[in-house]
Amino acid sequence: MTGQLLFALEVGGAADVATLTRDVAAAEAAGFVLVTIADSPLPPDGGPPRIEAGVRAAYLSRRTSRIGLAPTLHATVTEPFHLATQLASLDHASLGRAAWVVGAEHSADAYATVGEPVLTGDDLRRELEDVIDVARRLWDSWESDAVIRDVATGRFLDADRVHHVNFTGARFSIVGPLITPRPPQGRVVVIGADTLGVTSRLDVALVGLDDVAVRAEKARAEGAPLVFADVPEPDPGLLDELAGVVDGVRLHTTDVSGLIGSVRPRPTTGATLRERLGLRQEN
């Protein structure tokens, strides 16, 4: 159905590698702008171990060519410098197609995996803000032309174009700079739910279907350039209703092949995910 919306696909956290690769390839061929990959800091209940979402995205980066790759990385239980580096590396591997779904798992069991006290309320929101802010500062710590590869002098980079960060948050501090050169997009696309309390820091806000028009308007007012509705098992009529209310939809389905044949995403162009989403290039 509707060609007015951008389409994203949630591929879930339990799919085996063959299924994951098949589903993402099908979404790419159909014109979906990105896939998101769910994850949890806790092991699955039964079944085989789960491969971390960032690793799965890295695997897909060399088996796709156009679709954006957005692993869920939990800001609450992931070391911020490692998180920023992993996402920058994904952007390099995918040639500018990386995104980050901001995870905020904050159960006692999740925090126990890193030996930290549970955060809730304003403390949790502040932690998410700090991690998003420092990730962007780390991506900015290398200027776009810092790598010079001067064979004659044996210089790989211009040290004057690589900068310390000197960030102090509520629970951590980082000096920097990043150990990975600036991502091809400049800054990786940041995606998150409007319920996290950090909408002003998101490139794409995810809203639920309850009061969707009100939530979309609020997210835009708080500074989110794009708003996607989270849609479980969609029907064509619902998608038509959402056109003009949100910029895109993230679809959840157990039947990817059936879904692909029933939707018509809005065409996109550009070499990077930011370009295909119509976001400003951060170089």
Image: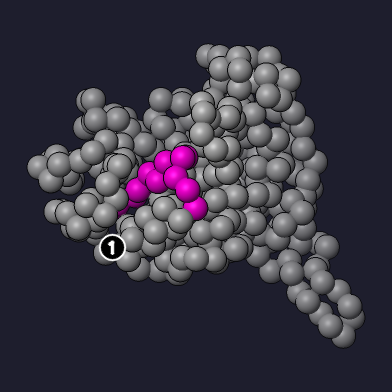
Residue 8 included in the magenta stretch of the image: yes
From where the camera sits, is residue 213 visible?
A: yes
Q: Position of residue 128 (x, y in %)?
A: 57, 29
Depth check: give the residue in front, 95 or 127: 95
Q: Position of residue 6 (x, y in %)?
A: 28, 53
Q: Residue at x 65, y 65 (%)?
A: 144
Q: Is residue 115 left or right of residue 58?
A: right
Residue 18 included in the magenta stretch of the image: no
Q: Residue furthest right?
A: 153
From where the camera sits, is residue 137 visible?
A: no
Q: Residue furthest front?
A: 47
Examine the image and state in which quarter residue 120 appears: top right
Amino acid on which disc 1 is placed: Ala
Q: Is residue 244 left or right of residue 91?
A: left
Q: Residue at x 50, y 66 (%)?
A: 63
Q: How is the image coloured?
A: one colour
Depth check: give the residue in front, 158 or 227: 227
Q: Is residue 201 above or below residue 266?
A: above
Q: Residue at x 76, y 74 (%)?
A: 148
Residue matched to label 1: 30
Q: Position of residue 227 (x, y in %)?
A: 33, 41
Depth check: give the residue in front, 89 or 234: 234
Secondary structure at numbered mark 1: helix
Examine the image and state in which quarter residue 111 appears: top right
Q: Is residue 17 above or below residue 110?
A: below
Q: Is residue 42 above or below residue 225?
A: above
Q: Is residue 178 left or right of residue 218?
A: right
Which region is colored magenta?
4-17
Q: Residue furthest left?
A: 237
Q: Residue at x 31, y 37 (%)?
A: 230
Q: Position of residue 264 (x, y in %)?
A: 20, 58
